[in-house]
Image: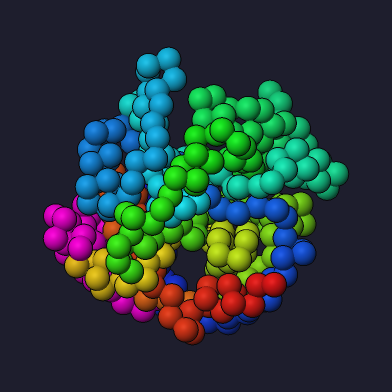
Amino acid sequence: MRGPKNIVMMIGLLSFVGIQPSHAQVGSSPDLRLSVVGVGTQNYADSLNFYTKVMGLRPAFSFSPNGKRTFTYLQMSKDTFLELQENPTNAPGLTHIHMQTRDADAIIARLRKAGVATCSETVKTSCTINSRIAGPTKEKNAVIVDPNGIRIEPTEFTPGSLTKNAFDTWDGASVPTKADATRLMVVGIAVKDYAESESFYEKAVGFPVAFKFTSPDGQRTTKYYQISRDSFLEMQSATPAMPVGLSHVHIVTGDLNAMIARLRQAGLASAARTATTPNTVTEAGLTQPSNVKSANVFDPNGIRLELNELLPESLTKKAMDSWK
């Protein structure tokens, strides 16, 4: 269970210095956009209740391949989702990422031209898998496996796919207030070899650096890669408190205080900023040096969902505003 310990890393950011912004340009970034993050759970009913009744996410569609496991796409905004997966035999946690693209084949071709291998029985990381039509969603998915084993799926939401249908039927009726107007903005990754991961994401994949933090002792760096105008990867070195893999997600909201109040009314206990207890929401505060008003929600499995309200001086807001 990774989630509860990740708060340690967030608290540590309060002492980070050496902010180095970078102005990302759309021409230098690949045709990718953060769209879906998988959430694995052993107690599917409990997690589904949490994400729908407490968090207020809309079930877009569900499927059960071979009737053995259930998957539900929970729609946060018109084009961002959490994919809740029933994993009765695996530890709960974040499982994979989908990034929307117009041409999955072109993404894979470009990576192979950059020297990224094809995945095989002997090559399992820093590799790619050709695209296919995934059933039953009918999306066109390829696969990128980063140096840490993190799975990223460049995905075309093709006509007739379940995700495209969810896009087309989204009317905003389920988001009557600013607090309810959420969307997926950032996914955090913890990496074992920072230099190797930097090379992979910057040189092979082509993600521009939006900004980075350096700790006062110079031993730890956090980089924000800008995938698209309004979606990011947050990369940190793995620690005992934050194992290699997907670490947390950021969900942006227009009114953090109102959202916290709604979550408390829905049954989440209030907790201090340093708390990591499942089924709680922490007090709001200012995360530095990113200048983001934030709070943390811990789901029934302890997975951390960082709630963000972007202020005028937020570094993510500045990166978004400078995107061309």
Left or right? Give the position of 226 relative to 104: left
Residue 256 placement: quadrant: bottom left
Colouring: rainbow
Of residues 203 and 226, which is closer to you in this image? 226
Find residue 165 and report its horizontal and vertical position in percent: 50, 39
- Magenta-colored stretch includes residue 270: yes
Q: Seen in the image, is 102 located left or right of residue 185?
A: right
Rendered residue at 28%/52% (across/down): 56
Q: Residue furthest bottom?
A: 313
Residue 218 picture location, percent across and down: 58, 75
Is 58 located above or below residue 203 in the figure? above
| 20 in the magenta segment | no
Residue 208 picture quarter: bottom right
Residue at image position (22%, 51%) is 54
The one of 291 and 189 positioned closer to us in this rendering: 291
Magenta residues (range) = 262-288
